[in-house]
Image (cartoon, rainbow, N blue to C red):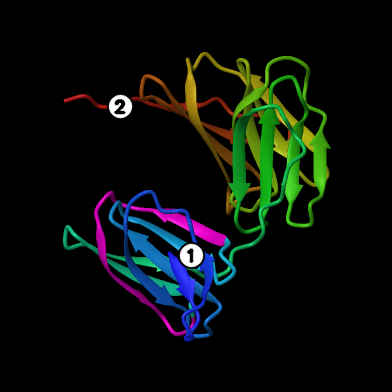
């Protein structure tokens, strides 16, 4: 993509598309532009030539492109007769994390804007929008995987080896631990009970079973086990 002044002076050459460019549109304020290509990719640029966002949708050529006056909604028309809407509204900056080690598991809560991060042989971390990092005194041993924050962002459930852990996050407190012969766990979920001061914790297993526990102040009730019905 090349930018020119009305006098015919070349001001910038924008390189980023892998296939030929099909459409280019400017924002109403003239500060950004959006281009599309024959492989279905869309790039949002600053007029200085910086790539602001790179979107990859269906691998079909885009032959129609329009940008709303507020610059936050984009519509694209594809070769396969599909029309797609894109949200270009400003997103929060990504917080760089000073960790070189690959995470085992990550869970995020949109309501509290927090992220829980588990790494092998390292304490569980809780990160927030203020770039604050809180460490949890997790037991030594295997890393926690999977992990899951509750919907209110105040509790977390995790699996370490064969041990289930229920954490209260404020302050960091390991409320309960228990073990169960569930087999491999793929997903965990935790939700506060609206009628009692307890939490319901669910685990989805490799063989399709779902285990359900009620975690109370000091104890964890015997689980309910739901087995899949195979016709």
Highlighted magenta segment, given as a residue range: 51-70
Q: For numbered disc 2, what is the local secondary structure?
A: loop
x and y percentages locating residue 65 in the rendered image: 32, 71
Specify whether 19 is left or right of 72. left
The correct choice, above or below, for 8 with respect to 129 in the image is: below
Q: Quadrant of residue 168?
A: top right
Lower position in the chain sequence, tag 1 or tag 2:
1
Name the quadrant of the N terminus.
bottom left
Q: For numbered disc 1, what is the local secondary structure?
A: strand
| Of the pair 100 and 139, the residue shown nearer to us | 100
Crowding at dot 2, Cα within 10 Å, few <14 / some 14-19 / many 20+, comes out as few
Specify whether 54 is left or right of 194. left
Residue receiving disc 2: 228
| Contact, mark 1 vs mark 2 (Cβ under 8 Å) | no
| Of the pair 186 and 211, the residue shown nearer to us | 186
Q: Which mark is residue 44?
A: 1
Q: Is residue 137 magenta?
A: no
The correct choice, above or below, for 43 with respect to 149 in the image is: below
The correct choice, above or below, for 65 with respect to 221 in the image is: below
Q: Quadrant of residue 40?
A: bottom left
Name the magenta segment's main secondary structure.
strand
Name the quadrant of the C terminus.
top left
x and y percentages locating residue 36 in the rendered image: 35, 62
Residue drawn where x is 50% and y is 63% of the image: 13
Label 1, label 2: how far apart the Cα atoms are: 46 Å
| Of the pair 148 and 30, the residue shown nearer to us | 30
Residue drawn where x is 51% and y is 26% of the image: 223
Mark 1 against mark 2, which lies toward the viewer?
1
x and y percentages locating residue 117 in the rendered image: 68, 36
Residue drawn where x is 24% and y is 53% of the image: 60
């Amino acid at each position: 993509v090349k930018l020119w002044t009305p006098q015919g002076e070349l001001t910038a050459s924008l390189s980023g598309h892998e296939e030929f460019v099909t459409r280019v549109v400017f924002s109403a304020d003239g500060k950004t532009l959006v281009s599309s290509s024959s492989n279905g990719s869309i790039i949002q640029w600053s007029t200085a030539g910086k790539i602001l966002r790179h979107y990859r949708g269906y691998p079909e050529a885009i032959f129609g492109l329009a940008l709303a006056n507020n610059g936050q909604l984009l519509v694209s028309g594809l070769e396969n007769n599909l029309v797609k809407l894109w949200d270009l509204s400003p997103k929060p900056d990504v917080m760089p994390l000073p960790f070189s080690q690959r995470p085992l598991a990550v869970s995020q809560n949109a309501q509290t804007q927090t992220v829980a991060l588990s790494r092998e042989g390292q304490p569980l971390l809780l990160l927030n929008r203020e770039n604050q990092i809180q460490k949890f005194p997790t037991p030594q041993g295997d890393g926690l995987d999977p992990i899951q924050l509750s919907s209110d962002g105040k509790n977390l459930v995790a699996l370490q080896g064969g041990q289930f852990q229920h954490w209260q996050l404020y302050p960091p407190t390991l409320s309960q631990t228990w073990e169960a012969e569930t087999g491999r766990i793929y997903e965990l979920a935790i939700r506060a009970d609206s009628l009692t001061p307890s939490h319901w914790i669910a685990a989805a297993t490799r063989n399709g079973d779902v285990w359900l526990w009620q975690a109370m102040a000091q104890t964890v009730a015997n689980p309910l086990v739901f087995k899949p019905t195979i016709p």
